[in-house]
Amino acid sequence: MPPPASRPLSPRAAVIMLALVVVVWGVNWPVMKTGLQHIGPMTFAAARIGLGGLTMFIGLAAAGRLVWPTRHDLPLILSVSLLHMVGFLVLVNTGLLFVDAGRSAILAYTTPLWVVPGAVWLLGERLSRLKVAGLATGLAGVAVLFNPLGFDWTHPDTLIGNGCLMLAALLWALAILHIRAHRWVTGPIELSPWQFLVGSLVLVPLAYVLEGSRPIDFTPELIAILAFNGPIASAFGFIAQILVARSLPAVTTSLGLLAVPMAGLLFSAWLLGETIDVTRGLGLVLIIGGLALVAWADRPRSSAQRA
């Protein structure tokens, strides 16, 4: 009999879990923006991954699901760790230094748009008309966000921040492509603590070398932010997303997660007083619309429909 954690959730429980993921990941954008006032971006990423990994190891060990990865799993562990946990987080944290949290959430969640051409080129997936329409719509949203009236192109910090966020989305897309191509031997939940461990082994020395001389402002606010980012936003969010994906149709999960950048934008406006202007709102609508079309194109079809 499989352990209880591996059983699908009931539809009601899965929807509630999906809503929790949207709220946790949405509110985490202004939380991360606030945390970077107290700690460097590299050190923040190292602390988040370290605390998240420790939570994963303790949780899986307590559930009797902590296993050694196989040699076959090592390439995936390395790619997810280096591309997503190291590259994505460091670039996002760097981008947040210069870009509003709401805009950052929108740009970071353009990742599925970059997965589409990558899947066609690297995995040989077919590009349907619906996916083409979704890609075009999403890219139109990116163009709206990067129009000359949207922000000051002449400011170096603006270019660095937005560039980091777009590069972060591309790295996450590469990790997703490897996940799609991987032949699974060990389950994603069981592999996750090892991915966190590798990420920590890379981030901790990098943070020490690059930010070791930078003081950390250990306030109660920072301690609460780290406690939220590691165990909740990272460990809980990761496991909850997998449980939701196992329990709900793929399209439902994908469309549900599109609410994360919207939640990030709204929470940033509420908690940080950021402005939701026309450029940001229109860009969000177009990007979410494009991602929705891509997700809908991936829905399972009956044999009659496929014919």
Image (spheres, rainbow, N blue to C red):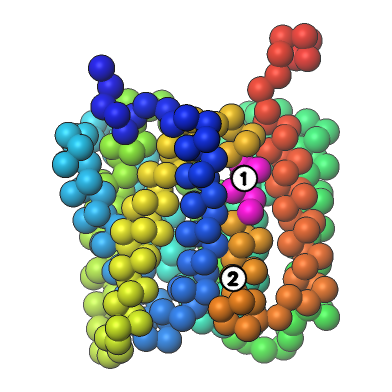
**Residue 256's disc number:** 1
Dot 1 or dot 2: first in sequence order is 1
**Residue positioned 74% across, 62% down in the render:** 284
**Residue positioned 26% across, 62% down in the render:** 51
Q: How many marks?
A: 2
Residue 307 vs residue 202, the one in the foreground: 307
**Residue positioned 62% across, 45% down in the render:** 256
Q: Split into 4 quadrants, where in the image is the N terminus? A: top left
- Residue 150 shown left or right of residue 179 in the figure: right
**Residue positioned 66% across, 22% down in the render:** 300
Q: Which residue is mark 2?
A: 267
Label 2 element class: helix
Extreme residue in the front direction: 12
Predominant SS of the magenta segment = helix
Label 1 element class: helix
Distance from disc 1 to disc 2, alpha carbons, whole Å, reads: 17 Å
The magenta-colored residue range is 254-259
Tell me which amino acid carries mark 1.
Gly
Tell me which amino acid carries mark 2.
Phe
Residue 236 vs residue 140, the one in the foreground: 236
